[in-house]
Image (tube, rainbow, N blue to C red):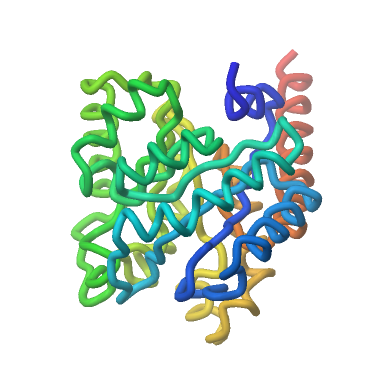
Amino acid sequence: MNRLEAAFQARRPLIMGILNATPDSFSDGGRHGTVEAAVAHGLVMAEEGADIIDVGGESTRPGSDPVSAAEQIARVVPVIRQLRAGLPDAIAISIDTTRAEVATAALDAGADFINDVSAGRDDPHMFALAAQRRVALVLMHMQGSPKTMQDDPRYEAVLDEVLEFLLERSRQAQAAGVAPERLILDPGIGFGKRRDDNLKLMAGLDRFTATGYRVLLGASRKRFMGAVCGETRPQQLVAATVATTALGVMAGVDLFRVHDVRENRQAADVTHAIRRAGAVGSAGRAR
């Protein structure tokens, strides 16, 4: 049993701490630009309750340009190696990339699974790699590319379209040999969506959890919440993010990708306890 599978055995929501080894990510770009700073932040997130550290070497903020595989590898591999040596053994590491070459190097360095925001569309070798290495794979929905995704996103029925896209990509991944229990669906909050699209996806999270696949929610500090709150600073959206985590737990979401681990760990644990208490109470009344 690998680290991620072992974490799921605990049957509680998992917190994935975001570790951007980039100079230009939307919320914390440049804050962890050295290997030492990145590793130190990863260790802090583990102490705060992260089950997973998600390491990425390419920003996917709106308007960002792609980064070469070689540059991504140079950014993430030293961080992953040192994290694997310093983290408690139970904590998993994921690699946030759309390139199979980067994912291969990261897995060799100690990463446990792959988080692909392109859902395997950017690199035709990604599905085969996940199947060969028998690792979990996150499939995320995104309309367009990071460079253009917020130019003018449009949907007729955003819930139906995002769900069908993810189910189709999951079918393609399984056809390439990825086991269904290793697939994780991510509706891609903020990736090629308008404010109301994001709100509708949040309101319909139970549609994704009802598929039987594990589901990841990545709403941390996203702009749609700032539009609701009248707040333009991502770092000031911690409380808003906590609200989305609580909502996601009630909808049955399995993983939460967040910047602020301690606050979201607390929200997830308390909401999970409330949800379990409600299930026990309902069972008691049924008897």
Q: Quarter-wise, where is residue 174 in the image?
A: top left
Check the image and name the residue furthest to the top. Answer: 287
In the image, residue 165 lies at what x, y percent?
24, 43
Name the residue located 58 percent from the left edge and 22 percent from the top edge.
Answer: 2
Tell me: residue 38, above or below residue 12. Answer: below
In the image, residue 81 lies at what x, y percent?
59, 43
Tell me: residue 194, above or below residue 40. Answer: below
- Left or right of 120: which side holds 269? right
Tell me: residue 254, above or below residue 146. Answer: above
Number of labels in the image equals: 0
- Could you tell me which quadrant the C terminus lies in? top right
Tell me: residue 166, above or below residue 150. Answer: above
In the image, residue 109 lies at what x, y percent?
52, 38
Name the residue located 49 percent from the left edge and 53 percent from the top edge.
Answer: 76
In the image, residue 136 lies at what x, y percent?
45, 30
In-front residue for pair 144/69: 69
Name the residue located 79 percent from the left edge and 46 percent from the top edge.
Answer: 270
- Could you tell me which quadrant the N terminus lies in? top right
In-front residue for pair 104/287: 104
- Left or right of 49: which side holds 141? left
Q: Quarter-wise, where is residue 171 in the image?
A: top left
Q: Quarter-wise, where is residue 5 in the image?
A: top right
In-front residue for pair 192/46: 46
Residue 207 visible in the shown view: no
Residue 65 visible in the shown view: yes
- Left or right of 176: which side holds 267? right
